[in-house]
Image (tube, grey):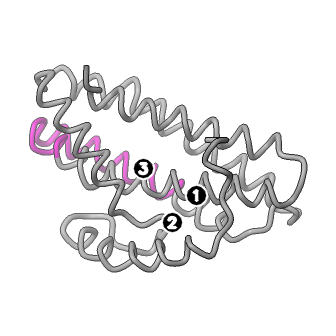
């Protein structure tokens, strides 16, 4: 059975926590760099995919209430994007790294709680299972074409965001070829 939008987003949240735990438990600098890169890659794609797929669905199906919820979500996303932007190029042996990582995860978990207990239940109540599954598939597909780094200064509202995503994604993906990531067997 295919995942609903709540399940797809929840699975992503679990993966992000796993990458964070692996980063925190790494004992050597190279492993920390790899897990920092993995967390950055996954979180940047996740956030932008939500903004391009799920947020428009909330507006479409929920009207003004959805728009109000999206505005809160965008504000929360911006805090996460700024933290991630500052973290993504910072060496794990920098004295600021651990405190910035903890702030990022605190901001992220605040946002996750908001999604899990407010946004997603309201949206799922309105959507049919088929619509929710279709939205989840769109969310997963969109992650394949989004940037893999945080760009907090980029526009975050349709349709400007869509345009900037298409410009930033190829550059990020090319740069990823030069970055170290954990071996796929560790994911």
Q: In this view, does 24 lie above or below 30?
A: above
What segment carries the magenta color? 57-80
The residue under label 2 is 150
| Mark 3 surroundings within 10 Å by alpha-carbon count, few (fewer than 14), some (14 through 19), many (20 or more) | many
How many numbered tags mark residues here?
3
The residue under the point 71% across, 58% down is 34
The residue under label 3 is 46
Q: Where is residue 13 in the image (x, y as percent from the top left)?
A: 50, 35
Q: Which mark is residue 40?
A: 1
Q: Which of marks 3 and 2 is nearer the N terminus?
A: 3
Q: What element carries label 1?
A: helix
The residue under the point 33% across, 48% down is 50
Q: Position of residue 21 (x, y in %)?
A: 72, 37
- Quarter occupied by the C terminus: top right
Q: Where is residue 167 in the image (x, y as percent from the top left)?
A: 33, 80
Q: Is mark 3 on a helix, strand or loop?
A: helix
């Amino acid at each position: 059975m295919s995942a609903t939008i709540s399940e797809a987003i929840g699975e992503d949240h679990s993966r992000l926590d796993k990458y964070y735990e692996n980063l925190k438990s790494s004992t050597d600098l190279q492993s920390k760099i790899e897990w920092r890169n993995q967390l950055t890659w996954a979180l940047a794609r996740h956030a932008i995919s939500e903004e391009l797929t799920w947020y428009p669905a909330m507006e479409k199906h929920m009207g003004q209430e959805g728009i109000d919820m999206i505005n809160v979500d965008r504000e929360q996303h911006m805090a996460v994007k700024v933290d991630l932007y500052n973290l993504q190029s910072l060496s794990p042996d920098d004295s600021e790294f651990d405190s910035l990582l903890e702030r990022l995860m605190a901001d992220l978990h605040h946002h996750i709680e908001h999604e899990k207990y407010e946004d997603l239940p309201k949206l799922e109540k309105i959507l049919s299972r088929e619509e929710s599954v279709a939205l989840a598939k769109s969310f997963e597909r969109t992650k394949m074409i989004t940037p893999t780094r945080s760009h907090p200064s980029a526009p975050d509202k349709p349709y400007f965001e869509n345009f900037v995503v298409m410009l930033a994604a190829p550059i990020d993906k090319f740069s990823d070829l030069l970055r170290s990531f954990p071996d796929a067997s560790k994911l």
